[in-house]
């Protein structure tokens, strides 16, 4: 088994472990690092268990066995060792701007001129933590959706000074490991995924807060309604198909959409009595002690949906 090169993962939380599995599935040597040495040790155990489960369920990515993929993943307790000789460094530490700055300053001091320095941040623009770096042209964001192993979308977010070659290399790497990269062409806080997601969450929150719908019924609108077609179509193609093209859709519905949208309330702070009520309703459906079971249920269905979409082709 010949390795394609080395990938460094900095941060061994859920996202870091998922990245490790994804890169190993494509045959890369992966070295993981976390400032908490116990976290990286635990990560190797968790990853082995997950890979075996995926293999037994015939959901394992790539052509290598679970054992082969796990053998490609190692750990270190030293950041310099982790980064040394890596083609690509994927930072996956918690979502904290100051922490990103500290990590990327360290990575900057260890990087070669050909190394890609990539963050998994979900909202923070790359210029925020790369502006003063020597290797800032090699810094960008690759933001995955959660859970990355089962949801392939990943946002590629360069800053104005990121090298086009680094962008294209990252896009090709994401495709190689089976992800679906999309490009955020200009920096905007929150990127695309979360700006869309937060707009939905905010309106759902208002509907509950205003006594319009229950949590269960709102979730059903997505899981049994909008989400079913959004699994295959985006919002714009949905518009295209729901009329005789987008121009006709706008002629028919633009005024109504505008009028409804003007009734949207202020952005909720997601606290207070509404927060307590939403939490109460959710705990009736998914008690806190069963979250891990429900996550497994979710991941199995996402994996099956992915298999279905692949089997159907484009």
Image: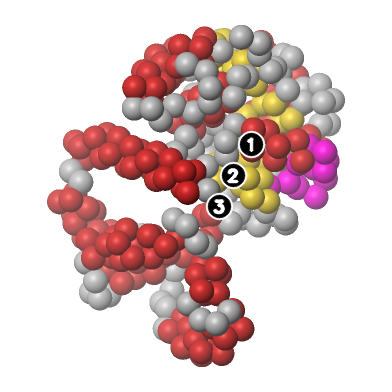
Q: Residue at x 46, y 88 (%)?
A: 256
Q: Name the residue under label 1.
A: 174
Q: Is residue 169 above or below residue 184?
A: above
Q: In this view, does 262 lie above or below 142?
A: below
Q: x, y (%) of residue 102?
A: 65, 30
In 3D space, how far apart are the residues under numbered discs 3 and 1 (Cα atoms)?
19 Å
Q: In this view, does 208 lie above or below 263?
A: above
In 3D space, how far apart are the residues under numbered discs 3 and 2 (Cα atoms)?
13 Å
Q: Name the residue under label 3.
A: 314
Q: x, y (%) of residue 247?
A: 61, 83
Q: Residue at x 53, y 22 (%)?
A: 63
Q: In this view, does 165 lie above or below 78?
A: below
Between label 3 and label 1, give the one nearer the viewer. Answer: 3
SS of the residue under disc 3: loop
Q: Name the residue under label 2.
A: 180
The magenta stretch is 157-167
Q: In terms of sequence position, does the residue under pointer 3 or pointer 1 come before the other?
A: 1
SS of the residue under disc 1: helix
In 3D space, how far apart are the residues under numbered discs 1 and 2 (Cα atoms)?
7 Å
Q: In terms of sequence position, does the residue under pointer 1 or pointer 2 come before the other?
A: 1
Q: Which colour scheme is used?
A: secondary structure
Disc 1 to disc 2: CB gap under 8 Å: yes
């Amino acid at each position: 088994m010949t390795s394609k090169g080395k990938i460094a993962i900095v941060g061994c939380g859920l996202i870091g472990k998922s990245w490790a599995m994804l890169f190993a599935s494509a045959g890369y040597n992966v070295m993981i690092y976390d400032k908490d040495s116990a976290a990286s040790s635990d990560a190797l155990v968790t990853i082995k268990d997950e890979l075996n489960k995926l293999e037994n369920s015939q959901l394992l990515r790539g052509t290598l066995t679970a054992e082969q993929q796990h053998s490609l993943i190692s750990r270190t307790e030293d950041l310099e060792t982790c980064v040394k000789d890596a083609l690509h460094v994927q930072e996956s530490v918690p979502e904290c701007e100051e922490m990103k700055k500290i990590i990327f300053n360290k990575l900057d001091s260890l990087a070669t001129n050909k190394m890609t320095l990539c963050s998994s941040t979900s909202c923070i623009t790359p210029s925020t933590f790369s502006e003063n770096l020597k290797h800032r042209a090699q810094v960008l964001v690759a933001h995955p959706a959660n859970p990355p192993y089962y949801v392939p979308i990943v946002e590629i977010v360069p800053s104005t000074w990121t090298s086009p070659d680094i962008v294209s290399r990252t896009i090709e790497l994401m495709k190689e490991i089976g992800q679906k990269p999309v490009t955020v062409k200009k920096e905007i806080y929150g990127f695309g995924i979360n700006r869309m997601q937060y707009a939905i969450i905010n309106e759902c929150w208002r509907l509950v807060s205003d006594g319009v719908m229950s949590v269960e019924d709102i979730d059903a609108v997505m899981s049994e309604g909008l989400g079913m077609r959004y699994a295959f179509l985006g919002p714009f193609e949905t518009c295209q198909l729901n009329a005789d093209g987008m121009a006709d859709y706008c002629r028919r519905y633009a005024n109504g959409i505008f009028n409804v949208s003007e009734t949207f309330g202020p952005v909720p702070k997601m606290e207070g009595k509404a927060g307590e009520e939403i939490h109460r309703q959710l705990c009736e459906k998914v008690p806190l002690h069963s979250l891990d079971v429900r996550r497994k249920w979710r991941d199995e269905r996402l994996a099956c949906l992915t298999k279905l979409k692949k089997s159907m082709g484009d």
